Image (cartoon, rainbow, N blue to C red):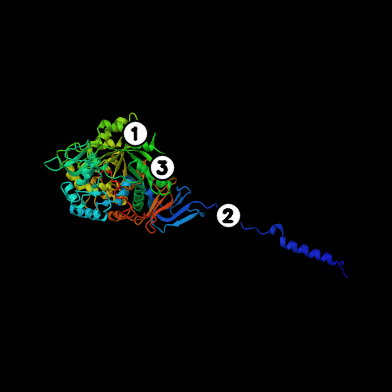
Amino acid sequence: MNCRPRQSPAFRRALVAAVAALALVGTPSIARKKPVVEALPPASGTLIDNVDGLTLDGKGGVERFDGFLIDGQGRIAQVYHRGEPRPRNVIYKLDGNGRVLVPGMIDAHGHVMDTGFAKMTLDLSSTKSLDEALSRIAAYAAAHPEAPWILGGGWNQAAWALDRMPTAAELDRVTGGKPAWLTRVDGHAGWANSAALSAAGVTAATADPAGGVILRIAGSKAPAGVLIDAASNLVEKKRPRPRPEDRDTALAEAQLALLSSGVTAVADMGTTIEDWQSFRRTADNGLLRLRIVSYAAGIDAMSLIGGPGPTPWLYDDRLKMNGVKLYLDGALGSRGAWLKAPYADDGKTRGLPQMSETQLGNLMSRAAIDNFQVAVHAIGDEANQAVLDAIDELVHTYKGDRRWRIEHAQVVDAADIPRFGRNGIVASMQPQHEASDRTMAEARLGPQRLAGAYAWKSLSAAGATLAFGSDTPVEPAHPFEGMAVAITRQGADGQPFQGWQPQEILTREAALGAYTTGAAYAMFAESRLGRIAKGYRADFLFVDADPMLATPDQLRAIKVSETWIGGVLAWSAAQDRGVVAKPDATDLNPQNPGTPSAGR
């Protein structure tokens, strides 16, 4: 019989342990593979996704997209189109729920502090008659008995269907002997009562200053109550000045007005040293959300603010001083625009040049020698020709990319339009002025000069860069309303049929470009602002309609729901994060508000 060797208990225990170990370990050929876990990169950026986005493509067309990534510096890292993969690991993701998204609008010509002060003082811009204006002035005076002066503006005798300017005697009836000074809507004239004229020492013996006119009572030399252009300074220098805290409140009010309208950047035309200090104080406190590019109020302010040259971008691209704003003439509404021929409705005047052509050339040269960008206010055809002549002279000395700016360019001789295509000129214009002023322009100019009035398409075709703005507070900073005017040449009432001077109607792409890429180019910011594209600042809006598809009425009525600047929500209609607590009237120190200095 077969016999196995006898195994000891110790041997058997060792054998069982070895088999168990082998079962646990297995053989190399059948070993289980551990699943590989893919390591995600560290979370970074903000993803804006599921949007109906549009932007200009940099070639004159429109690019559509549905998402983009914002990096940690508030710039766009990548733009995504339908079907393209998105990053899997981001710090924050916003689902746009299919809402329309467009680049932030740039207002190429505004008055930031004046916009804020207009919110703090008596506003006559909506009045339709002299009687309505006087009623509102009386109510304001009664509501502010503590105010040493009654200050405000926005009146427009053309909107009142008045064929003359208002008078001091009419203002006296509702101001109770307290000085009153109310600027015209264009900022180029002021309406004073007798107390304000007395405070300024304006009498029958006061001569008209150079570049200004004191309107007189018919048949005498006594001042009638309205002072135009340089004459306004006689009262301006006597009215109480704003305190720093008033200026800061005005800036807060202006930011709210601009952000809620979709304006993410603005060229401030006529920045004083006091304005600049308010911008800096607000930015130092982390409260400057808007991007402001300043153009100093004359050579002295330019030197005080910029010193040897333009400032760099400050506060994460929120503030910069680019150049200087010069005034060559006045406005059409107050017959201060400098024309080649007399006014059709007043053959005794061609307007009010604010300086000689020699002085203009000297001031432009003084700015250009230190590389400040020059922006010149020119409304009449003679003024525009004078600026073009000065540029033709200066380009032989000051080479390079100067981007000479002509602000308004409202009335241009047809013979001068081709000259806008030379020397890199920027035509900084305001479409809303055409809708507001067309009937007044017809009266001031007569039919022979209308072809060169508000000639957007012709100037663009000649080679000028169009940069659109509002001239706020002369017009409200509503860029989509401006776009509607640009593509129709009509007012909100749809008049005139087929548009006023319809040969100047722009395409939607051109109108959008003038409020984005063109306006950015005008302020030397075309590589960082104006588009939704890689490397650009993430400034964008959520709006309730597609501006490229909306009817003109829908375009005019577009509402902004959110305004984002640098990838951060700066204003929201739902949360109203931009609300400024408006001080009580007694806290505003009504003796100190500012006044507009704009052109129309």
Q: Are marks 1 and 3 in contact (CB under 8 Å)?
A: no
- Answer with left or right where residue 201 lies relative to residue 9: left
* Near-viewer residue (444 or 207): 207
- Answer with left or right where residue 22 lies relative to residue 392: right
Question: Could you tell me which secondary element the residue under label 3 belongs to?
Answer: loop
Q: Do the residues labelled 2 and 3 touch (CB within 8 Å)?
A: no
Q: Which of marks 1 and 3 is nearer the N terminus?
A: 1
Question: Could you tell me which secondary element the residue under label 2 belongs to?
Answer: loop
Q: Is residue 452 visible?
A: no
Q: In which quarter of the image is residue 322?
A: top left
Measuring from the top left, give residue 115's x and y in whole percent.
31, 48
Disc 1 to disc 2, C-alpha distance:
60 Å
Q: Nearer the viewer, mark 1 or mark 2?
A: 1
Q: Which of marks 2 and 3 is in front?
A: 3
Mark 2 lies on residue: 38
The amino acid type of the residue labelled 3 equals Ser
The amino acid type of the residue labelled 2 equals Glu
Mark 1 lies on residue: 367
Classed neighbour count for the residue bearing mark 2: other residues with Cα under 10 Å, few (<14), some (14–19), many (≥20): few
Q: Which of marks 2 and 3 is nearer the N terminus?
A: 2
Question: Could you tell me which secondary element the residue under label 1 belongs to?
Answer: helix
Residue 527 numbered tag:
3
Disc 2 to disc 3, C-alpha distance:
37 Å
Identity of the residue furthest to the bottom in this view = 1
